[in-house]
Structures are given as structure tokens and as C-alpha cells.
């Protein structure tokens, strides 16, 4: 929508602004512009119940519905197919391809701006209509995708689940038996969760009948992690990139291609997350991301102010230098975000919920994403018009605040199986250190119980098999 918002025909048709003689856009109705942007996230949140701005709002509402469904399903599906040692890597790969789509969309919008000097309706209608092409491809090829083995176990189709696990885990050499052991662990959890109560959205949110699962805590964690992600500044940088670069002192044409170049760097930065997410964990990924993003946003605000002051005083060369510095900070911010905060808020809800409510847990994550993006895109035009470059300081402060929040409330999910997450959230206290302490205690109890079970089944041969049996049972139980 960044390129669409810069189309003169679109601005005039939506009636939220006017076009200057040099082609620059003047927004006169910030509420309408922000509302058209934010209603997409309202559609994502609640779905669809029911020419001009009314048509555009309605279409984005429906579009938001489909996007919300995909956002709720794809990460959970990928996490349930992936091995716990590489779960983060696979989901990070999804976002590399996701941002590739953003890059294609942006440069497509940039290319059509030259048709009829940018005043044609084709400039904004074609980029929106082009979204149909990949959706048709998805509709055709999704029938070949394997079903989640955990969902298959949940509905009693264990043979199909084992077949899929064998295909994705392997059956030869060192991989022999891994699929069966994982299936046994999944089946054990399915049996335990059959008697679980409190699986409705209402019960999950308020923690009714959840017992030691503490689903309400998990719901709050994923909602607020998504809201924090949105308010670290990426929605503003991505959707209003051209406006932000204009504040930095760039002209209309330069603003467009610099914003597109920023998206390319954004795409490549996600590859870093693919490599690091399962090595350093979720928490440390968020920590170093918040530091880098916060510093970049603070500096971007100061450098942008320097560019605006220099341009106001007639010092064009100085304004360009200040603007180049501000633009580099936006590039750095986007690069760091793509390597850190982009992936974790989507990966975390796909990991931490029990099988019985994992899809609903992802849905609660989408709720947080919808609230965060919806509120930000609604108020961002007002923020830009009111305080200009000072909006970067708001984003910087949010990054600083996120560090103690993640440290205190978000336990590490890296290198832990999906079936272990109930142990991780078994503690009654909210703090991460309490969660880790309780997890260690329960794992030790689980290991001792496994040894006792082996003793009772094979007392004569236990001495010779103690080491291997302990290892095998622990894998099977987890």
C-alpha cells in the first residue's frame, strides 16, 4: 500500500488528500487514509460480515479475512511438521519468501507509476489486482501439502500421521525409529488432552478451566508480543516508507526508489534469522533486535530533524547530507528487524500452546497483530502530521521497553519439543525464572518415572541397559 498511497488518481478517488504540481501528496483527511489502511487488520480480526472509498474499505476488509486465516494456520502447520531442533529455521524461511513478495509488490507499484505520468488509475488498480495470481497458485498447489501429523493423531488417523513423520524425519540409518518415537509422544499428549477443558476462545483468554496449563498467560504473551512488534516501528517504516524518506529531505522520485531499495535489504536480512534463530534462541534474538532497532530509531529522529532544519534555512546540500544519514538509520532498523523481531512473534505462538488449542493460540496471536497494526496504521497519519520526525522517538522508546518485558515474562522455547511446552508453563508464577525452575523439576520427575517404569518392565536386564534405556524412554516420553 505504500506505492498505492502515492498514486494521484488513488488519492483523488479516495478523497483523503490532494496532489501538488510537483506530484507530491498532501493528506487532508488523515482519519480516512489511516482508516483504509487499518480496516485491513479489522478484517483480519473479525472477518467479513456483510467505486470510491467505500468499495476500497470493503475489499480490504475481505482481504484481511483471508490474510488472517493464513497467518493463523501457516506458522502452526509449519511448526507441527518441523523437528524441534530446526523449527525456528523453517518458519524463518517462510518470512524470507514473505518479504520477497513485499519486494515484488513494491517494485511493481513503482514500475506502473510511469504510465501516463502516474495519473492513470492503472497505477493503483493493477498492483492490487495482481495479488490474485499468487493466490490462485496457492489454491492449486495447497492440495499437495501434507497434513499436520499432530492434527491427524488428534482425530485418530495415526497411520497417516506415522507415514508423514517418516517422510519428513527419515527411516534409514540414524533416522530409524525417530518417527515412531515422536508419534508415541504425540499420542500420549493427545490422550492427556482429551479430558482437557477450557478450550474455547473465551476460556483461553480468561483462564477458565485451564488448570496448570495456564493458557490465559500464554494468550496474553502472544497478543502483547505481536503488539510490541508492530509498535517497534516496522509498520510505519514499511507502509509509510515514502513519507518517512520525505521527512528525511528526499524528493518524490528519490523517496520512491530508496524505499524500494530498503525493502530489498529487508528481504536479505531475514536470511540471518534463518541461520541464527535455532542457535541463539528466541529471547536473545529479541534482545539484540531491540537494542539495534532502538538505537537506529533514536538516531533517525535526530538526523531527520537536522535535515528538516537545514532545508528550512535553505541549506540544500546540508539537508541532503542529514537526509542520507537518516535514510541509513532506516535501512539499519529494517535490516535488524528482519533478522530478529519479524519472525519470533509469529514463531512463539506456534510453539507454546497445547495441541488441543494450538490453532486457537495462533488465532490469538493474529488478534494481537491485528490490534497492533490496526491501531498504528490508524493513528500514524496523525502522528506524522503532528510531530513529524519525533515519531521515531516513540518507536525507539517501545524498543527499549520491550527488553525488560521479554526478559521477565517470556521463557525460552528454543530446542524444546512442542510436547514439552506444558512443562515450561506449569509454574504458577509469571516470571521466566520460575518457569525454568519448574520445568527443570518436572523434567527430572519425568526422567525418574521413566527409569522406574523400565525397572518394573525388565528388572533382570536393567543393569546392562540403563544408559540406552534412559535415553530411549526420555525421547519417547517427550
Image (cartoon, helix red, strand yellow):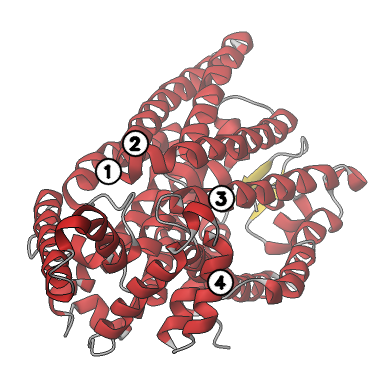
Is 213 drawn above or below residue 463 in the view shown?
below
Q: In this figure, which residue is indicated by the disc labeled 4?
A: 164
Report how far apart the C-alphas of labels 4 and 3 lie in the structure.
Answer: 24 Å
Q: Which dot, 3 or 1, sits closer to the camera? A: 3
Residue 408 vs residue 78: left or right? left
- Of the image marks 2 and 1, the number of the one nearer the N terminus: 2
Residue 24 image point, x, y percent: 70, 39
Q: Place residue 372 in its image quadrant.
A: bottom left
Q: Place residue 117 in its image quadrant.
A: top right
> Is residue 248 or residue 98 the one in the foreground?
98
> Is residue 217 or residue 350 the one in the foreground?
350
Q: In this figure, which residue is indicated by the disc labeled 1?
A: 402
- Of the image marks 4 and 3, the number of the one nearer the N terminus: 3
| Residues marked 2 and 1 touching at CB (< 8 Å) | yes
Q: In this figure, which residue is indicated by the disc labeled 3?
A: 95
The residue at the point 40 percent across, 55 percent down is: 84
Q: Quadrant of the N terminus?
A: bottom right
Query: Which disc, if any, is residue 290?
Result: 2
* SS for callout 1: helix
Query: Which disc, if any, is residue 154?
Result: none
Q: Quadrant of the C terminus?
A: bottom left
| Residues marked 4 and 2 touching at CB (< 8 Å) | no
* SS for callout 2: helix
* SS for callout 3: helix
Amino acid at each position: 500500500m505504500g506505492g498505492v498511497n502515492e498514486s494521484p488518481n488513488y488519492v483523488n478517488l479516495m478523497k483523503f488528500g490532494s496532489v501538488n504540481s510537483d506530484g507530491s501528496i498532501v493528506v487532508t483527511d488523515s482519519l480516512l487514509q489511516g482508516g483504509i489502511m487499518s480496516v485491513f487488520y479489522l478484517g483480519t480480526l473479525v472477518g467479513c460480515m456483510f467505486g470510491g472509498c467505500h468499495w476500497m474499505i470493503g475489499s480490504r476488509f475481505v482481504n484481511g479475512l483471508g490474510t488472517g486465516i493464513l497467518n493463523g494456520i501457516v506458522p502452526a502447520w509449519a511448526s507441527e511438521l518441523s523437528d524441534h531442533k530446526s523449527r525456528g529455521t523453517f518458519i524463518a524461511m517462510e518470512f524470507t519468501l514473505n518479504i520477497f513478495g513485499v519486494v515484488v509488490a513494491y517494485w511493481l507499484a513503482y514500475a506502473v507509476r510511469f504510465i501516463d505520468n502516474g495519473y492513470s488509475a492503472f497505477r493503483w488498480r493493477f498492483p492490487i489486482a495482481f495479488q490474485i495470481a499468487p493466490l490462485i497458485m496457492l489454491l492449486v498447489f495447497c492440495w499437495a501439502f501434507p497434513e499436520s501429523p499432530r492434527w491427524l493423531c488428534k482425530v485418530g488417523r495415526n497411520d497417516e500421521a506415522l507415514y508423514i513423520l517418516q517422510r519428513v524425519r527419515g527411516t534409514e540409518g540414524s533416522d530409524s525409529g525417530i518417527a515412531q518415537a515422536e508419534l508415541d509422544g504425540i499420542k500420549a499428549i493427545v490422550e492427556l488432552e482429551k479430558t482437557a477443558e477450557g478450550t474455547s476462545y473465551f476460556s483461553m483468554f480468561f483462564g477458565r478451566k485451564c488448570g496448570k496449563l495456564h493458557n490465559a498467560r500464554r494468550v496474553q504473551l502472544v497478543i502483547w508480543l505481536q503488539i510490541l512488534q508492530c509498535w517497534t516501528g516496522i509498520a510505519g517504516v514499511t507502509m509509510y516508507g515514502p513519507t518517512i524518506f520525505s521527512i528525511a529531505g528526499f524528493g518524490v522520485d528519490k523517496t520512491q526508489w530508496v524505499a524500494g531499495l530498503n525493502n530489498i535489504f529487508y528481504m536479505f536480512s531475514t536470511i540471518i534469522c534463518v541461520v541464527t534463530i535455532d542457535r541463539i534462541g528466541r529471547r536473545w534474538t529479541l534482545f539484540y533486535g531491540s537494542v539495534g532497532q532502538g538505537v537506529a530509531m533514536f538516531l533517525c529522529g535526530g538526523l531527520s530533524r537536522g535535515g528538516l532544519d537545514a532545508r528550512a534555512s535553505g541549506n540544500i546540500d546540508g539537508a541532503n547530507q542529514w537526509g542520507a544519514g537518516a535514510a541509513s538509520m532506516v535501512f539499519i532498523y529494517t535490516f535488524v528487524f528482519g533478522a530478529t523481531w519479524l519472525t519470533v512473534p509469529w514463531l512463539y505462538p506456534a510453539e507454546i500452546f497445547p495441541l488441543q488449542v494450538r490453532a486457537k493460540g495462533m488465532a490469538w496471536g493474529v488478534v494481537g497483530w491485528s490490534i497492533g497494526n490496526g491501531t498504528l496504521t490508524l493513528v500514524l497519519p496523525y502522528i506524522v502530521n503532528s510531530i513529524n520526525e519525533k515519531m521515531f522517538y516513540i518507536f525507539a522508546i517501545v524498543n527499549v521497553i520491550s527488553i525488560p518485558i521479554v526478559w521477565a515474562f517470556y521463557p525460552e522455547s528454543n530446542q524444546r519439543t512442542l510436547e514439552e511446552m506444558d512443562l515450561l508453563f506449569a509454574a504458577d508464577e509469571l516470571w521466566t525464572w520460575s518457569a525454568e525452575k519448574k520445568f527443570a523439576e518436572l523434567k527430572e520427575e519425568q526422567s525418574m518415572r521413566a527409569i522406574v517404569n523400565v525397572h518394573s518392565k525388565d528388572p533382570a536386564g536393567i543393569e546392562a541397559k540403563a544408559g540406552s534405556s534412559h535415553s530411549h524412554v526420555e525421547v519417547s516420553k517427550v
